[in-house]
Amino acid sequence: MDYSFDDQHRLIHFKYDLAPQVLAKLSRTLPELLMHDGLVTCSFEWRNHPECEKLKTLAGEWARIHFAGDIINISCDKLIGSDFDLLATMTMARCRSERMPAAVKLMVWFFAFDNFLDEPAHMGADLQASQEMMDAVMNVFHNVVAVEEVGIIKNGDKPEIVGPMKGGNSVYGSAIRVIRESACDWWNEMRQLGMSMRQQYRFVSVFQRYLDSNTEQVAFRQSCEIPDLDTYKELRLHTSGCYVCSMMLEFALGLDLADEIIEHPLLVALNVAAFSHVMFVNDIFSFRKELSDGDLMNLVPVLLWHNLGGMSSICGGGVEAVVRETVAQALALVRELDGECVRLVAEIRAAVRGGNGPLADEGAAAAVDKYVDGVSDWLSGNLRWHRISKRYIVQE
């Protein structure tokens, strides 16, 4: 998208003049607004995994092994204090206990990894460094290791266990090494626990799409552009990592869904609606912190930017009204998605019990029911976690 001089002027004014005004107006009302049960909606009941305390201890111990000390912009204490283990146990509350340790490790790792890629002051605006990090992680998944280190290469249908690898040459070399070696740990564990080759291939595919979307997001940050809403929604659907998490959910539930099930129109529609709900809930709860960091890749700033329509809305003293309308639009989007998820869950249940089609096939029906339960838990657990997490609190 090419911006005119006037558009660029508006963008600069928005970022450096309007953003502080928005933060000031929200500083008193936002916490109460977001904690109100009736505003940010999810119709599914939240729950927690019965072994949540045990998994919390495991997550802390694992983080201290792999993320000891400060690495660029995240510390081990901050990683543990963000309660990503709780996000895992609340979103995967009915998953198999023997698979939860690997899933919790992946959740902690994923946020550490995403923190690097999403930080505007570091890799979030450095395409070369972020590409080096992404290549290193994909080498783990493709099982391509430095020959001079362990002498292993990709091995057909029976991948070898991935070993430790050397860091890159950039200033982020130590961080890349830590991310890569910790990825080896949970990836090997998931494979040893029985992750099928079909699931491995699908996991790698959705993770690659997640990385490609992050590359697009870096390009937006480098150019100081704000995408239009449709572009943002499509991009965010993948940068949020929700498709990666859906693979983690399927694995942790002990499922190995056939392609024809995953690609069924009702399952596709449910995933899109559910993932959109998850990412917009995250955007609403995180936008105050992200805006304070100068990051505009968030639903609320995107809506705000396009609602302004021109300098007159600012100069005319209409900022407060525009902000209220923008937040209302964001909340309305979440409510619509919540209703869509309820409708799709009911349709899928009906299709399973109707006796016709692939969702009702013998052996598939029970798995589809379990997956739908898992998606419902993800929606409710995600919202509950955002309400109680300290991750997005802005220090005054």
Image: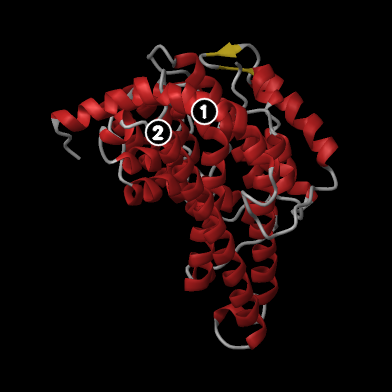
**What's the distance in space between the residues labelled 2 and 1, CA to CA?**
10 Å
Q: Quadrant of the N terminus?
A: top left
Image x and y of residue 22, in percent: 46, 28
Q: Look at mark 2 in the image and give the residue it sits on.
A: 319
- Applied colour scheme: secondary structure
* Farthest front residue in view: 316
In this view, the residue in front, 206 or 142, is: 206
Residues under numbered marks 2 and 1 in contact, where contact means CB atoms less than 8 Å apart: yes
Any part of residue 177 in sight: yes
Any part of residue 157 in sight: no
Q: Amino acid at mark 2?
A: Val
Image x and y of residue 71, in percent: 55, 14
Q: Secondary structure at mark 1?
A: helix
Q: Secondary structure at mark 2?
A: helix
* Farthest bottom residue in view: 355
Task: Tell me the residue at 67%/36% (across/down).
Answer: 32
In this view, the residue in front, 76 or 293, is: 293
In this view, the residue in front, 12 or 213, is: 12
Q: Is residue 283 above or below residue 379?
A: above
Q: Quadrant of the C terminus?
A: top right
Q: Look at mark 1 in the image and give the residue it sits on.
A: 25
